Image: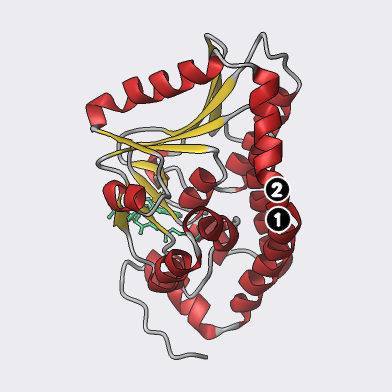
Amino acid sequence: MDQVVSLNIEDQIATLTIEREKALNALNADALSQLREHISDLNGRSFEEVRAVVLRGAGDKAFVAGADIKLMQQSSEAELRSFIKLGQDVMNSLEAMPLPVIAAVQGFAIGGGMELALAADIIIASTKAKFGQAETNLGLIPGFGGTQRLMLRSGMGTAKTLIFGADTISAQEAHRLHIVDYIAEPEELDRKVSQVVSNLTTKGPLAVAAAKRAIQQPYKDGLMLGLEKEVDEFIGLFQFKDTQEGLSAFIEKRKANFRGE
Ligand code: CAA
């Protein structure tokens, strides 16, 4: 298995970096499995060792440009189901961590990349970052929790507008829509992340964990039901020619021609 996610712990802050820069850090099965392993490792550590987690994408261009489209196009239905479930599992595990999770978004956070950011507690973005649930461009829907978590963060109208239209929006627009919590100029992003995260590390870690559980509790059951529906709808779309057309069009670098069949 290629090493595509690194973990670095310094001053009680764990940084998880997706390292597939050539594919704009797209999430393949290795990346998801390694994220899951690192989350489990971090969950086993004491608060003396770690107080917060920062998620990053390698390079300047992308945080994460989505689930790996090339991999999905080649997968059987069973492989797709287990890939999507793995992705959902990783996002759920991040949300369930007792530690606060901060997404530091410097570039594209598209599809599964936006969903990874949405699974974090706090999103801090560079003014150069771009967000979007681009899946309908591929004849798909979000599959890593975006249909649920975008709605929870920014309301049903915004979730429908962004998911139906597959719009790519600026960090400033995402901030206005309450998707992003802080924005900073690109050269100021690291300083802003460090300021927010260092502040969290001085608070009572048990209190932060308790607040996280309490804030999320009312949405838990509905979220789980929604996630199950999301997997079924996502997989269901693969029986249609439109989805094959959408995936092929991306790989062939052309515009998709959808016919509703
Ligand atoms: N999967 C696989 N490879 C990807 C990828 C992805 N999601 N996103 C980018 N890449 C690859 C490209 O194929 C390209 O590879 P080659 O050099 O081998 O051609 C390389 O990364 C660089 O990408 P581009 O040349 O496209 O870069 P760009 O600057 O022209 O465009 C971009 C940047 C607008 C982000 C564009 O790459 C893009 O639209 N990517 C796909 C975004 C997307 O649709 N994400 C949703 C995926 S589906 C999903 O995530 C489902 C889910 O919820 C589970």
Image x and y of residue 59, in percent: 34, 33
Amino acid at pointer 2: Asp
Q: Is residue 257 left or right of residue 156?
A: left
Q: Quadrant of the N terminus?
A: top right
Nearer to us in this view, 190 or 16: 190
Label 2: how many residues lie within 10 Å, few (<14), some (14-19) or many (20+)?
some
Query: Cβ(mark 2) to ligand 1 < 8 Å?
Result: no
Image x and y of residue 20, in percent: 45, 39
The residue wearing badge 1 is 85
**Camera sees residue 96:** no
The residue wearing badge 2 is 89
> At 68% from the left edge and 64% from the top edge, which residue is drawn?
226
Q: Residue 105 appears in which quarter of the rendering?
A: top left
> At 55% from the left edge and 39% from the top edge, which residue is drawn?
120
Where is 216 relative to 206, above or below?
A: below
> At 32% from the left edge and 66% from the top edge, which residue is drawn?
253
**Camera sees residue 256:** yes
Image x and y of residue 14, in percent: 56, 20
Amino acid at pointer 1: Lys
In what element is the residue under mark 2?
A: helix
Q: Is residue 229 left or right of residue 68?
A: right
Q: Are marks 2 and 1 in contact (CB under 8 Å)?
A: yes
In what element is the residue under mark 1?
A: helix
Where is 171 relative to 149, above or below?
A: above
Q: Residue 136 appears in which quarter of the rendering?
A: bottom left
